[in-house]
């Protein structure tokens, strides 16, 4: 199960060096083709990895741009929306994030535009936001409720709806919040190192009565970092972290498997730093 954490300093908190933190693990089939995080050819202001699967090539699970936009998504376990996806010719979910990052629309305008389009995609959770304007929206395609303006200081999102109550999600969010608050005045690279250690945690949060999806691998999926037996050919294959300082200097770190089709692969780190563009 993928998991993503977001923290932003609110107006009532004393200012520190860090004002925004994003961290997440991508859990995916090892054979699914993808590009490592980099600036995109069609718009060098956009940064992120890219799905290269035939039919959905070019989408992304998590990305940012230099104008302060951030977006990430997860699928929703056990939900089909009553649709035969193979026959419905539904769009790849990764386009939800890539379209947002490439568009000139504000976060609110993009989310409103999406409201009538959600059923064209397989079940998803989506967060789109603007670091510079401190505005973030959450949308999913299952509950059919209007998109939600996020007011929380921090969220954790996995493959259930926001606030689903899964132990993995709630327990890890508490640890994430504590880690960030203890390092809000640290050098970004110091915090990134600690976030990487956090994302590599294999402690399992099981049994969990709030997970209603029957799956023999629920226990294996209950840790932040998912280690799967090679015969299942899936697990955590990418860690992504981003820290934004008060001066809008962003530091983005991706750690990903060198050979995604090999569960024993070595890992590659890619570090990017840029100043967000204030209009």
Image (spheres, helix red, strand yellow):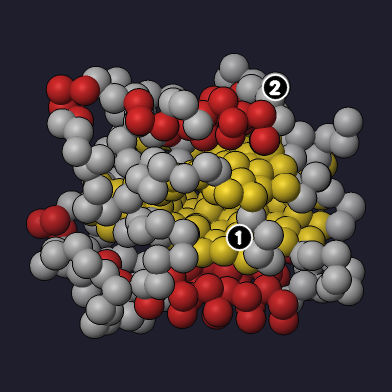
Write down the quadrant of residue 235 in the picture.
bottom left
Question: Which residue is the site of mark 2?
Answer: 104
Q: Nearer the viewer, residue 16 or 38?
A: 16
Measured from the top left, where is residue 110 in percent x and y?
61, 29
Q: Residues within 10 Å of mark 2 (few under 14, many from 20)?
A: few
Q: Is residue 217 left or right of residue 90?
A: left
Q: Is residue 220 visible?
A: no
Q: Give the residue at the far top of this rendering.
A: 42
Residue shown at the point (80%, 45%) measured from the top left: 133
Question: Which residue is the site of mark 1?
Answer: 6
Q: Secondary structure at mark 2?
A: loop
Q: Is residue 30 left or right of residue 153?
A: left
Residue shown at the point (61%, 60%) measured from the top left: 6
Q: Tell which circle, 1 or 2, labels the residue nearer the N-terminal end.
A: 1
Measure the C-alpha gap from mark 1 to mark 2.
23 Å
Q: Quadrant of the N terminus?
A: bottom left
Measured from the top left, where is residue 200 in percent x and y?
43, 70
Reply above or below: 230 against 168. above
Reply above or below: 119 against 74. above
């Amino acid at each position: 199960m993928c998991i993503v954490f977001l923290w932003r300093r609110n107006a009532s908190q004393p200012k520190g060096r860090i004002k925004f933190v994003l961290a997440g693990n991508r859990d995916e089939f090892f054979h699914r083709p993808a590009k490592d995080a980099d600036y995109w050819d069609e718009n060098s202001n956009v940064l992120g990895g890219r799905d290269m699967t035939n039919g959905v090539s070019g989408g992304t699970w998590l990305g940012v741009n230099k104008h302060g936009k951030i977006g990430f998504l997860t699928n929703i376990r056990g939900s089909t929306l009553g649709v035969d996806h193979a026959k419905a010719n539904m769009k790849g979910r990764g386009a939800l994030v890539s379209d947002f990052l490439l568009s000139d629309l504000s976060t609110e305008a993009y989310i409103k535009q999406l409201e009538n389009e959600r059923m064209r995609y397989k079940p998803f959770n989506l967060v789109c936001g603007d670091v510079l304007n401190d505005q973030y929206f959450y949308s999913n395609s299952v509950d059919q409720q209007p998109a939600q303006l996020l007011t929380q200081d921090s969220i954790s999102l996995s493959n259930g709806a926001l606030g689903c109550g899964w132990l993995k999600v709630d327990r890890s969010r508490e640890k994430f919040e504590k880690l960030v608050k203890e390092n809000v005045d640290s050098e970004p690279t110091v915090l990134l190192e600690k976030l990487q250690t956090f994302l590599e945690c294999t402690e399992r949060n099981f049994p969990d009565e709030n997970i209603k999806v029957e799956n023999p691998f629920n226990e294996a999926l209950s840790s932040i970092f998912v280690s799967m037996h090679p015969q299942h050919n899936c697990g955590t294959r990418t860690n992504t972290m981003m820290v934004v300082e008060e001066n809008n200097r962003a530091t983005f770190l991706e750690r990903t498997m060198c050979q995604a089709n090999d569960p024993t692969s070595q890992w590659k780190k890619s570090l990017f730093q840029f100043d967000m563009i204030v209009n």
